[in-house]
Amino acid sequence: MASQPIRKPTRLEPWQDPGQTPYVRIDRVTKRFGDFVAVDEVSLSIHRGEFFALLGGSGSGKTTLLRMLAGFETPSDGKIYIDGVDMTGIPPYERPVNMMFQSYALFPHMTVEQNVAFGLKQDRVPKPEIRDRVAEMLNLVQLGQFAKRKPHQLSGGQRQRVALARSLVKRPKLLLLDEPLGALDRRLREQTQFELVNIQERLGITFIVVTHDQEEAMTMSSRIAVMNHGKIAQVGTPSEVYEYPNSRFVSEFIGSVNLFEGIVAEEQSDHVLIRSEEAGCDLYINHGVMVPPGTRVAVAIRPEKITLAKEAPAAADGRNLARGLVREIAYLGDMSIYLVQLAGGKTVRVTAPNVTRRTEMPITWEDEVYLSWQPFAGVVLTQ
């Protein structure tokens, strides 16, 4: 009898492992300001060592939730636990938490090292230990050579790193970051995102970041909670939230998307067929959705999942194949964006990488084109 190969066990992420205890547990938390409900019965579990993002637009409740974690706001209902301890009634200065604000709030009259050391001095840490810990943090954020400078002598990115060092030097178990990169320009923000991830991985501290920038959340976080009107719309890894949104709101909030309305014509365990007048074709998706025929749904298709061509694909059977006119083109260097108007009037967004250097684009304005996509490209949304 032939021996069976030994399969290497699949490593579970902490949030997938039922044996793991969440480090931060938010249990049915609600926050009211008069008649206004800012946070509406939110429950979340965040594990030790995660880089977790609260993502949402203005008024979604993300900052209020962060302030309750920090102790600056008290929940109207519900509980917040950190490392198994109920934080209700515990003031901010007694929590194992530090918070980094968007404004950085550096003392202008103090040097970089004095700013970083401030919290340790307040805690009456011995001077030799303060010196060592400040030097360690400044080296970690690559600012050791700027220790004697004042904040006004630093760039925006350097001030951001001073604020981070000051937040980390007290060795919190949990670091809360409120729009930490909002004051930086785009290029510096992109660079700093990777620096933050590297620092977090080296220290192993749990980070919770609030941001309205979807790209920032996707780049830095292990998981994202998308918030809308005080509620959690979806929680998942960046790829889960992007590739498998659970609602129209999430599909439109995260990245660009094309939504096609339609009626379920056929539903099986391995596929669903949707009749869509908007698309001008039947939409075939290679997974079931457990809804009866006749149900009105939407199909979300990301722009990069659509192929643009002047000729119809050879194997086309009329499904997942639309036709239209190119109305707008935006050349962005690494890719181009095409806005294609279908026969029914709907405009579809298509993105294509510019893999070769071109002096003339093969597809241009007012060209008649075919749009096609694979069965796995669409996600059926019932809410």
Image (cartoon, rainbow, N blue to C red):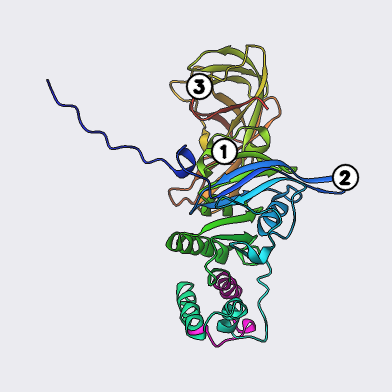
Q: Residue furthest left?
A: 1
Q: Are dots 2 and 1 in contact, CB under 8 Å?
A: no
Can you say whether 248 is above or below 192 in the image?
above
Q: Are dots 3 and 1 in contact, CB under 8 Å?
A: no
Mark 1 residue type:
Pro
- Quadrant assignment, res 174: bottom right
Which label lies toward us, 2 or 1?
2
Q: Estimate the spatial distance between the alpha carbons at disc 3 and disc 1, rounded to whole Å.
A: 20 Å
Q: Position of residue 229 (x, y in %)?
A: 75, 42
Query: In the rendered structure, which segment of residues is drawn in magenta?
Result: 145-166
Q: Position of residue 277 (x, y in %)?
A: 67, 20
Q: Earlier in the sequence, mark 3 or mark 2?
A: 2
Mark 3 residue type:
His
Q: Magenta span has 146?
A: yes
What is the tally of numbered marks visible in this picture?
Answer: 3
Can you say whether 27 is above or below 345 in the image?
below
Q: Which residue is at 57% across, 82% downward?
A: 112
Residue ID for mark 3: 287
Q: Which residue is at 67% across, 83% downward?
A: 108
Crowding at mark 1 (Cα within 10 Å: few <14, some 14-19, many 20+): many
Q: Quadrant of the C terminus?
A: top right
Residue ID for mark 1: 303
Mark 2 residue type:
Asp
Q: Magenta part mainly helix, strand or loop?
A: helix
Q: Which residue is at 67% across, 80% downward?
A: 107
Q: Position of residue 7 (x, y in %)?
A: 26, 34
